[in-house]
Image (cartoon, rainbow, N blue to C red):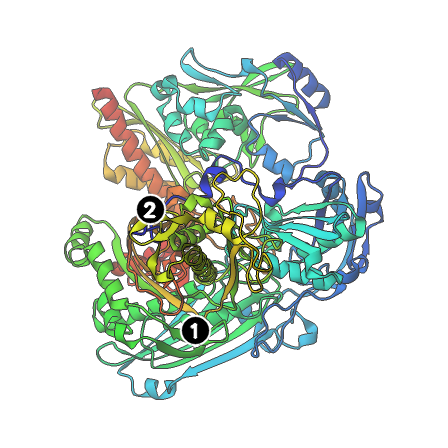
Amino acid sequence: MKPPRFRYYAPHSLEEALAVLAETADEAKPLAGGQSLIPMLNMRLARPSLLIDLNGLHELSGIELDSGAIVVRAMTRHRTVERSPLVAEHAPLLAEAIRWVGHLPIRTRGTVGGSVAHADPAAELPGVLVALDGTVQLTSQRGQRLVPAQDFFVDLLTTAAEPDELVTEVRFPFLPARTGTAWLEVARRHGDYALVGVGAVVSLAEDFTTITEARLSFIGVGGRPVRARLAESALRGQPVAAETWRAAAATVRGEIDPAGDIHASAEYRRYVAGVLAERALALAAERAREGARR
Amino acid sequence: MPTRIFGEPIKRAEDPRLLTGRGRYTDDIDLPGQLHVAFLRSPLAHARIRSIDVSAARDMPGVVAVWTYADIGPCQRRMPLLIPHPDLTHPYTRYALAKDEVNHVGEPVAMVIAESRYLAEDAVEAIVVEWEELPPVVDIERAVQPDAPLVHEELGTNVAAHYVGIVGDPEGAFSRAAHVFRERLIIERSAGMPIETRAIVAVWNDVEGVLEVWDTTQAPIVIRNALAALFGLAPTQVRVVAPDVGGGFGCKIMVYPEEVLVPYAALALRRPIKWTEDRLEHFVGTNHERLQIHDAEIAVDAEGRILGIRDRFLHDAGAYTPYGIIVPIITACQLPGPYKVPNYHVEFRAVYSNTVPVSPYRGAGRPHAAFVMERLLDRVADELGLDRAEVRRRNFIQPHEFPYDVGLIFQDGAPTRYDSGNYPGMLDLLLQQMDYDRLVREELPRLRAEGRCVGVGIACYVEGTGIGPYEGATVRVEPTGQVYVATGMPQQGQAHKTVLAQIVAEELQVPVESVQVFEGDTAHFQFGSGTYASRSAVVCGSAVALAARKVREQGLQLAAEELEVAVEDLVVEDGRVYVRGAPERGFTWAQLAQLANPLRYAYAGDLVVRPRPWTGPTLPPGKQPTLEATEYYSPPHATWASGAVGLLVEVDIETGQLFFRKLWVVHDCGKMINPMVVEGQVHGGIAQGIGGAFYEKLYYDENGQLLNASFMDFLIPTAMEIPRMEVAHQETPSPLNPLGVKGVGEAGAIPMPAVVAAAVEDALRPFGVRITRMPLDPDQLWRMTHPESP
């Protein structure tokens, strides 16, 4: 479990990093927290000839508010997000989900940008980003662009980023009024990749009895985070009631197409996705009401 | 009054060093000029080697040697069969490097020795092997069919051993039984996963003419003897040291190919050589355990008393049988557990498959046995409408019935004879601890009325521990006052340095800190076999006690002579030997050690040696210049520990998640040397047992590829998954050994599959399911509660 030979470069600025990346994109791999890349190197599953270490780029760290969104710069550690009062206030779904990411040592090293760029379909952050209709900022020497999360995640470990582009920011939009969120997942052990996980976002009408909008974003049930669009549209206008959540679960089971592996079968994942949807929707609706009361 | 040290929960002497990162493990040992090894391992489960081309690898930078079977000189012999057995009619061991056939994924094929591990792994990739694929044998039920492909063609069969054990008249018992119940019970494949993988460093010490080897082994003396024999060296020309070892769980007791190849490289190349197993290698290169398929039947009378048991099982031996059939033998002998089984037919076939070989992993056949026995008893209780605890009570061996003969020959070749125990007392203590009646009559119904899916299980077990052949120890009082203790046992975390010191400190009444235990180094002790089978405290502890008692006698004798009093008038207290009632008339142990040795001691502060008139030789014949004794202890047979566990679980039937709500343990390992260490062993064993019940399973596909060879996919429970447990002790001393102790090393791991099955089955009563396979997982639990699911 030793990596094959590679060169290592530690740029001093984003500009320099982008310049090096532009020259070497096909053979280079940016190194963020290393929680996925380093094991892949050691198992010789990834063989970049150059590592561009972003850990010295302090300009890529930080959390701030910006025009209706909470902006997390790419090299911000999970642990920083987990402890951020800004995140707790403006992106409670992110705050809730991030505790499910690995274990404390992993969260202490792992970065938001790294997780998003790695695009593991069972990872929490991509699921949260898709649930919140967030965006990913990509930067290259050619310029900057914002890609909606839904378009950014293409398939298993595959994103819309070009080889010369770096993920530099991730934006989580604020929630509308009377909106609650919930993150639930089932993993074999605490900290494992989810067998199934779901982020639910529920917005209620002013009387708190009707759903104006609902979103469901699943992880572990496809090659990328999966939005349950049919269930979401069926929920719009429905009453806040147990039967509503149960019906949504059935719709979810009909529209997702998970695969099985040694940890859980496709049938299990399909069923449990419905269970978690039902529970997460109820919880999110409850929180929408509680939030308004507070 | 003598100070009580034996039996006190003192903190582990090992911990300050280990917890502050000052441990020294084999991989921490770096020698100047050291070379590194990487192995090419078979990517196929079953194949012939047509050719191996190592030329490109040999030419790579930093590569010193690339060896295949043809290059390994004395290591070309087959690896040893460590434990033969008359019923192991078709043993088969491997070559250190595959000669012309590979039989499991991970089998070493070629060895690269290079200036760094990185370069060595690069070179491994450049070795070209032309394979001729053979049909893999993975499913052991298929393997025993007459037309199955063979793992080892020349054996003509996949059955390594066929064992039959019969006690009483099983056929008669079944024919007159009121009820007979039958189960098919399966325990899946798993493996020990010590946090420290295996590692070996070897160097030829040219100054002294000694081959020095650091090895993570559980049996350094065994390795020393093997290397000496293999290389034609005197045993004293080989020194094997097991330094700090980070867990063993059984899989580090073996003579593995790497353990002879790395020392051979040190001899052949005259350079220090290091190999550290990486985790991928550990999954496919270090022995596994567990898979057994039982077809078991129990015959009972109308009151649920056992008349007989019949069990036929298949045991997956893996590709080779270097450790014989120890695991299934233990299963066969321990299956009756703490119960009277007057008529018993047990039969197994140990079956070859193209998978990693099987040898003991903590529990070593016992979790399987307890699972079968306890499942059968739960079945009896449920079918007869009896409380599960009551069925057990009706079948226990009673305290007055010891010694109790099960009627079979145990793993050590001795009768399976329980020496002592109090099983009804143990269960009563458990039920009391659980508040069982209230739990079952009030709490469970209350929780169920809330719609919660909760269940309770109990399980009882015995554990044959402390087997021979023997261990030894040297105890010496140094003239500086410290006490030196040396044994042949290494440790992998069990606190030998603490508990062996307690034994000596108790005998000599010295501070436990003054006792220094040296172990795991053949330079300190030459005879013994190692740490396994929950035997260290029993066998080595007894040898230490015998040696310490002899030193105590020596000290008393010497003091009596010097003080001109009778031995009976002396007491040993406060680190001194003195005249009863006259504490000023006496000596410290340091003074006695000096008196024993007619030399002058520079710097020793309180010399008591004074010039004496000439009476002959300074050291008269028959005297030794030291308070020192070496003693050996060889147990007549195993001593039998026992235990009982209770578990309250909750199942989320919609997600199949299992929650351990409460866990109670009663354990009886005879006299406890250190209750804190005992509890640590119980906790660790139970954690591992929970692994075996809900997490740890090795998945082979039909091609013999291991699908989850990483800690991402092979699930070891972490602290997050282990519930709090309440541990209570019962002490039923063993009459067999001088300390009255029994082993505890594997205890907790044994009952967990059984108790988890019982509790989950109880929780799922509304669904009428039977738990017959371990480990469980959420998918299985979900299927049981959603029978309509595909």
Question: In the image shown, does A160 or B557 lie closer to the viewer?
Answer: B557
Where is residue A75? Give x, y as percent: 53, 21
Rendered residue at 41%/51% (across/down): B505
Mark 1 lies on a secondary structure that is: helix
Residue projecting furthest to the top: A67
Amino acid under label 1? Cys
Where is residue B212? Give x, y as percent: 69, 50
Residue B741 in view (yes/no): no
Where is residue A102? Give x, y as percent: 46, 35
Mark drawn on residue B723? 2
B390 is higher (above) or lower (below) than B73:
below
Q: Chain of mark 1?
A: B
Residue A54 in view (yes/no): yes
Q: Is residue B633 left or right of residue B90?
A: left
From the viewer's perspective, is the residue at label 1 or at label 2 nearer? 1
Separation of marks 1 and 2 at Cα, in angstroms: 31 Å
Question: In the image shown, does B407 or B92 lie closer to the viewer?
Answer: B407
Callout 1 touching callout 2 (CB < 8 Å): no
Neighbor class of circle 2 (other Cα within 10 Å; few <14, some 14-19, many 20+) is some
Find residue A24 and report its image quarter.
top right
Mark drawn on residue B333? 1
Neighbor class of circle 1 (other Cα within 10 Å; few <14, some 14-19, many 20+) is many
Find residue B159 and report its image quarter.
bottom right
Mark 2 lies on a secondary structure that is: loop
Where is residue B297? Give x, y as percent: 37, 76
Disc on the earlier residue, 1 or 2: 1
Q: Are marks 1 and 2 on the same chain?
A: yes
Q: Is residue B342 left or right of residue B346?
A: left
B201 is higher (above) or lower (below) than B320:
above
Rendered residue at 63%/69% (across/down): B81
Amino acid under label 2? Pro
Quadrant including the C terminus of chain B: bottom left
